[in-house]
Amino acid sequence: MALLGFGGKSAADGQRAMRAFLIGETAKIAIVIVLFVVVLKTMRVVPLAMLGTYVATFCVFWVALANMLPPLGGTNIPRGRKKKQLI
């Protein structure tokens, strides 16, 4: 997906880059669906447990990613330090 988004002509044009990311995301979802079907057809698994585990892993991924983002209120000043006032 990253190679599609950042490689070639798509890096020069915003619309092409967005289209490349959407194509990559669609391909990723299609591969996940195909792999789920293959596992459900070839192995003896409990489908609800497998899907529940996938959803739980997906949620943990997004929560961990959200925790890495900077705060929305602007700069983060540690609690022990105060801002210097310019007079």
Image: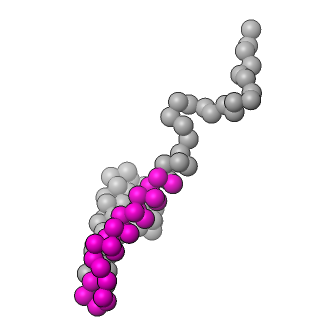
Q: Residue at x 45, y 68 (%)?
A: 3
Residue 15 lies in magenta, yes or no?
A: no
Residue 53 lies in magenta, yes or no?
A: yes
Q: Is residue 49 visible?
A: yes
- Quarter of the image for residue 44 reads bottom left
Q: Is residue 20 visible?
A: no
- Quarter of the image for residue 55 reads bottom left
Residue 53, how many percent across, how many down? 38, 69
Residue 69 in the figure: left or right of residue 20:
right
User: Which residue is at the front of the view, 34 or 9?
Assistant: 34
Which region shows up in magenta? 40-64
Image quadrant containing the C terminus: top right
Q: Residue at x 44, y 55 (%)?
A: 62
User: Which residue is at the front of the view, 66 or 55?
Assistant: 55
- Count of labels in the image: 0
SS assignment for the magenta stretch, majority: helix
Q: Residue at x 48, y 48 (%)?
A: 66
Residue 79 in the figure: left or right of residue 38:
right
Residue 11, how many percent across, how many down? 44, 58
35 up-or-down from 48: above or below: below
Residue 16, how many percent across, how many down? 34, 57
63 up-or-down from 53: above or below: above
Q: Residue at x 43, y 65 (%)?
A: 57
- Quarter of the image for residue 59 reads bottom left
Residue 70, how many percent across, how many down? 56, 41
Image quadrant containing the N terminus: bottom left
80 up-or-down from 84: above or below: below
